[in-house]
Amino acid sequence: MWNYNTPGIPDEKFERRENVPITKEEVRTIQICKARLKAGQTVYDIGCGSGSISIESSLQIGSSGKVLAIDYNKNAIDLTKKNIEKFNLTNVSVIFGNAKEKISELEDADVIFIGGTGGDTKEIVELSQKKLKSGGRIVIGIILIETLYSVLQILNKLNFEAVDLTQVTISKSRKTSTGTMMLARNPITIISASKA
């Protein structure tokens, strides 16, 4: 399905539903790079949505690693399962439920992605820190300024190292009747950091 070593599977390759979010291709690529994935790692994808981060991570860590995809939205869980099947992956487990309740039950992780959290990002970062191995990476995609502020505060409080902020605004081309125009998407801030 995806015969390349690089991240960046085009969005149209994924099964989609209108009410289930997807981390867009270009943003996903940056997030995967910021995670510094290696073969054999254990990865959480919290707020997995369509499963695009789970799929990309799975391909990067190989069959010796595992991805734990978590979402509280039943439609997201069903869609992630469809995408796992579509890409013929065997190293992704899908967990239905509230991440705040499920994280404590999971094995320790090398990398944790945090996406759509329904406004609980700060609490999920706190819980994730306890499950992240020493030197492990956390990567958080943020849209709201208020969430950005609260996450920076908690990362500082928890003594994360090498905190990096990258804000991206992507424009994509679209054909019109008279030519091609560029349409801007919402800016996304990607925070990445390492556990001390």
Image (cartoon, grey):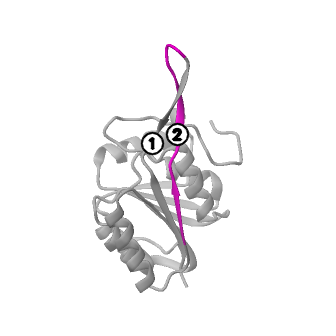
Queried whether the magenta region covers residue 150, the answer comes back as: no
Label 2 sits on what residue type? Ser
Which residue lies at the image location 53% right of the left edge and 50% below the top edge? 27
Which disc is residue 158 wearing?
none
**Would residue 144 appear left or right of 53 to someone viewing this image?**
left
Q: Which residue is mark 2?
A: 171
Determine which quarter of the picture holds residue 98.
bottom left
In the displayed structure, 79 sits above or below 69; it is above
Q: Position of residue 78 (x, y in %)?
A: 36, 43
Whether the residues at callouts 2 and 1 have beta carbons within 8 Å, the answer is yes
Q: Residues within 10 Å of mark 2 (few under 14, many from 20)?
A: few
Residue type at mark 1 is Arg
Mark 1: which secondary structure?
loop
Given residues 190 and 94, the one toward you in this image is 190
Instruction: Determine if residue 179 is in view.
Output: yes
Q: Residue at x 71, y 43 (%)?
A: 4
> Picture coordinates of residue 72 (x, y %)?
29, 55
- In x, y percent, where is residue 44? 47, 63
Mark 1 = which residue?
185
Q: Quadrant of the C terminus?
A: bottom right
Q: How far apart in space, not on screen, are marks 2 and 1 (Cα)?
A: 6 Å
The part of the chain drawn in magenta is 164-178
Dot 1 alpha-carbon crowd within 10 angstroms: few under 14, some 14 to 19, many 20 or more = few
If the image is split into quadrants, where does the N terminus sit? top right
What number of labels is visible? Answer: 2
Residue 127 location, quadrant: bottom left
Q: Nearer the viewer, residue 180 or 152?
A: 180
Asked whether residue 172 is drawn in magenta, I would say yes
Q: Which residue does the image show at 38% across and 56% down from the upper left?
A: 143
Q: Measured along the vertical axis of the image, is residue 85 above or below residue 29?
A: above
Give the dominant element type of the magenta stretch: helix, strand or loop: strand
Q: Secondary structure at mark 2?
A: strand
